[in-house]
């Protein structure tokens, strides 16, 4: 991010803001294997069609997903698979933090007992 102009930093922040919603992360996870229709995603998440459509539209606006109409159905797929590398990196970092906290708790408990 070094030496990026303000406009680029704002775009990066907006991209991460899209990923800050748990429902969108759940949808991304469901699209990991292959494209799905809005109806399939609504059924798998348990959310309404309108809610899922709203989240997908927001992700499409930021080029995270691609929309394709086929007949009366709309299908979505990931625009750039590297999104999963980013998400896996963040998940791995959080998992390490929790493992460290668990180890510290166990050490504390062992010394107190």
Image (tube, rainbow, N blue to C red):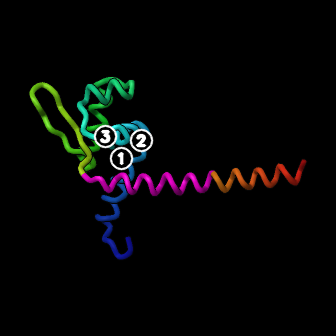
Q: CA distance from mark 3 to mark 2?
A: 16 Å
Q: Residue at x 68, y 53 (%)?
A: 101
Write the residue at 25% across / 30% down: 38
> What residue span does the magenta drawing correspond to?
80-98
Distance, label 2 to label 1, CA atoms, is: 6 Å
Which residue bears the numbered disc 1? 18
- Marks 3 and 2: which is nearer the front? 3
Q: Which mark is residue 31?
A: 3
Q: Is residue 44 above or below residue 33?
A: above
The residue carrying mark 2 is: 21
Q: Quadrant of residue 104?
A: bottom right
**Does dot 1 land on a helix, a strand or a loop?**
helix
Q: Do the CB atoms of the residues marked 3 and 2 lie less than 8 Å apart?
A: no
Residue placed farthest to the front in the image?
33
**Against 23, is 17 above or below?**
below
Residue drawn at 40 percent across, 42 percent down: 25
């Amino acid at each position: 991010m070094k030496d990026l102009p303000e406009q680029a930093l704002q775009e990066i922040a907006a991209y991460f803001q899209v990923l800050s919603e748990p429902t969108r992360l759940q949808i991304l996870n469901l699209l990991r294997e292959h494209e799905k229709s809005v109806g399939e995603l609504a059924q798998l998440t348990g959310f309404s069609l309108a809610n899922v459509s709203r989240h997908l539209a927001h992700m499409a606006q930021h080029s995270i997903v691609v929309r394709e109409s086929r007949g009366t159905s709309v299908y979505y797929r990931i625009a750039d698979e590297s999104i999963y590398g980013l998400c896996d990196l963040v998940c791995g970092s959080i998992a390490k933090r929790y493992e460290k906290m668990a180890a510290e708790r166990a050490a504390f408990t062992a010394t107190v007992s």
